[in-house]
Each structure stands twice: as C-alpha cells, then as structure tokens.
Image: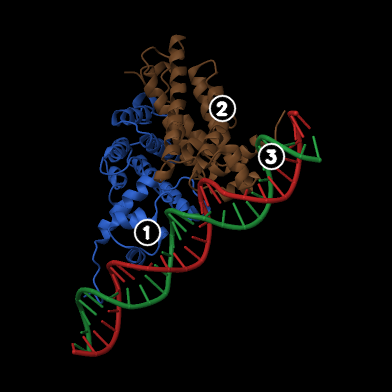
Chain colours: A brown, B blue, C green, D red
Amino acid sequence: MHKGRPREFDVQKALDAALLLFWRHGYEGTSLASLTTAMGINVPSLYAAFGNKETLFKKVLERYLQNPASYLPKAMEQPTARRAVEKLFSGAIDMAMNPRHPSGCLLVQGALASGPAAASVRKELSLRRAAAEAAVRRRFERAIAQGDLPANVNTARLARYILTVLWGLSVQAAGGATRAQLRQVTQLALQNWPASPSRARSAAE
Amino acid sequence: MHKGRPREFDVQKALDAALLLFWRHGYEGTSLASLTTAMGINVPSLYAAFGNKETLFKKVLERYLQNPASYLPKAMEQPTARRAVEKLFSGAIDMAMNPRHPSGCLLVQGALASGPAAASVRKELSLRRAAAEAAVRRRFERAIAQGDLPANVNTARLARYILTVLWGLSVQAAGGATRAQLRQVTQLALQNWPASPSRARSAAE
DNA sequence: ATACTTTTGTATCGGGGACTACAATAAGTA
DNA sequence: TACTTATTGTAGTCCCCGATACAAAAGTAT
C-alpha cells in the first residue's frame, strides 16, 4: 500500500488540534511553534503533510465547515424557513457555548482584519461568509416556492439580515455573552419574521 | 514653556495615522515599522511619545471613540429611543462607507481573536463594546422613564440585540457590503421595534 | 540483503518582530 | 556663553516568525 516510512500521526486529529488554535487565536495570532506543539508533530512533518501555514489554515477551514459548523446546512433542512433559521441560531449558540472549543465562529474570528501577509486568508473567510449567506438565501427562495414564505419577501435582504445577526452573535460570544443572552438576542431578531400573520410584509419590497 | 527640544510632529495627526493602520490591519497585523512610516516619525519618537505598541493602541482607541466613533453618544441625544437607534445605525453606516478610513468598527476589527501577547488589547476592546451596549441600555431606560418606550421593555435585552446587529454590520462591512445593503439590514432590524403600536410587547419579558 | 521512498528529528536559515543605546540636535535657562 | 532638558536619527539589540537542509529511521519493492 504505502511506500516509504508511514506517517506516525493522525491527519484529522492534527487538523482538529490546529483548528482549536486558529479558532482561539486567529490566523495571525497562531504561531507554527504553537501549532506543532498542539498537533504533536514537528515542523517538517507539518510542511510535508499540509504545505505551509496558509494551506494548513484552508484545510482547517474545510474541516471546520464539515465538523463543528455543519449546523448551518443541517438547519436548512428544517421543514419551514422559520424553523430553519431557529435551528441555525440555536446551532450557532450551541457551538458557541460548547466548552470543548472557543466561542464564536471561525469565519469571523479567523481574520477579520489582518496584515498584508494574511490577505488571502481574509479574502477566503469573506467568501465563505458570503457562501453561508447564499445558502440561507436559497433556502428562503425554496420556502417561497413552497408557499412557506410570502412571495413578496426579498430573500437576499432577509438572508443578509439573518447572517448579520449571526455574525453579531459571534462577536458577542467572543465578548463572553452567556447562552441565555444569546438566545434572547435571537428571539428578538425573529420577532419581525415575515410569515407572522400580522406583519407579512415586513421583509418585503 | 516647553523645556528641551520641541516635538517636530503633531501628536493628534500621528494618532490619526496610527488609527488608520490599526483599523485596517488589526492590532497584531500592524507592525511598528509600518506605524512609524505612516506616522512620519522614527521609532524612538514613537516610544517617547506613546510608550509602547500596546499603550499606543489604547491612545488610538480613545481617539477613535472621540473622533470617528462619536456618532454613538451623539445618536443617543435624539429625542426618542427609536430615533436614537436609527441615528446609531445610520451613523455606523456612514462611518463604514467613508472612503477616508477602513470599513467596520475598530472595536470589532482591532482584535476579536489574538495571540496571548495581545490578550490585554482584546480584553480592552471587549470592555469598550460592553460600554457601548451599556450606553444604549441607559438611553432605553431614560426612554421608559419619559414614556417613550413601553415600561415592560427589557432594556438590557433590547440594547444587546441592537448592538449585536451593530457588530454584525461591522463584519458585513469588512466583507464589502454596500451602503444600500447595510441600510436594508438595519431597516429589517428595526421592524420589531417595541414602541410600534401593534406590537408593543415585542421586546418585553 | 539491497535499493528505494517517505517521514522524522535536529539544527538551523534569513527575515522581520518589538524595542533600546547613544550621540547629535534644538530648544529653554542661568 | 555654558548648562539643562527633551527629541531626533542611526544603528543595533534580542527574539521569535515562517520555512528548510540534511541525515537517521522505518517502511515497501526487488
């Protein structure tokens, strides 16, 4: 099967360890020395397996989206758009409150602002945030097609609002907000939901 | 008046130049070399005038709150709580769209996640965000006392929601959102305003 | 065995990070 | 004019950054 000396570490475990560091300290705040220590490998092994710091981060990012951040696509499977957003928020809060990893979302914590060297990472995170917004927007479009949302709802605007609240939750979580506080924020954020009978035109126009 | 050789640069101008760098690249992403270049001074002058990188950042932060971010206390002077929040959002959008400086809010961009060396800066920013939230909450309390908001409104929760949207706007602005997009988000965010006659109990309990 | 291939460990590399020593300079003060 | 005080400019400090060279180790293939 394998040629040459076999790898002595688990790639996924190493990625998970790297994820925790990038998540907590951001891309620029995470050093290679701290990475190799946490991953339990030495520097040449890291470079042989993951390329360099930037490509390592991007693989960590993929891992993040598949494992702890999979609550977003999962939430979109809910039967109604309203339930989907509720599940999106509760999933985000559950993740933020999980003591096994840092608070907030890696798409926000990773590199909101950065030096020129990390511009590529910053751009990648920005694209991923836009992709998340697009996924929610597509869910809303499906909801309109299914009669679940009023047809005059502007799906792009509603999705952008929902994601703005989601990113804001990430900032609040980084500041040490409690689960109850975050939940109350999401409850307020959903009170202008367009499907609610008395305010069907809320997100319209 | 002054003893010794007089300073050859304007402290405020230098702080403004440093502000632009910290704002765009974050605390960790800004190097002393780039700072001295932008400020037009050399390294010993920087240390003599501002202490070190961390104390420089904190002075820059004060400057930021007084000059470009003064829209928040200004907005709180509006006659009603609703108008105050509208002004808060429009002020934030105006600042984000000003081409003379970076997008987003320094309280968010400065250091959401960071390495251990910048923990003090991260904590300081977190405190300032909490202070901003408290200022809005106090404005809501005044609004209740003045009959401007229903007495059963939970001011802390409503303020936290408003600030969550504000921080979310900062993330969206960092991602390149347009003025129209940000404005639409704030319009949606205000549709569940508790003073609105048909939904006076929205933010309550 | 021997050759070949890949990973591992050690020991670096050049570069840039924040920060400072020190002498020259430019003002006020005697 | 000499003295004092503070800033400026040059040069350099130490240290950690991301990234590598190279030989020993541990497997497969012949």
Which SS class for mark 2? helix
Of callouts 2 and 3, the N-terminal one = 3
- Quadrant of residue B202 within the rendered picture: top left
Quarter placement of the N terminus of chain B = bottom left
Q: Residues within 10 Å of mark 1 (few under 14, many from 20)?
A: some
Left or right of A32? Residue B201 is left
Vertical order, A14 against D7 (above or below):
above
Q: Is residue B164 visible?
A: no
Q: Chain of mark 1?
A: B
x and y, in percent, of residue B85 in the image: 32, 37
- Quadrant of residue A157 within the rendered picture: top left
The residue wearing badge 3 is: A9
Amino acid bearing label 1: Leu
The residue wearing badge 2 is: A71
Amino acid bearing label 2: Tyr
Left or right of B160? Residue A3 is right
x and y, in percent, of residue A55 in the image: 52, 37
Which SS class for mark 3? loop
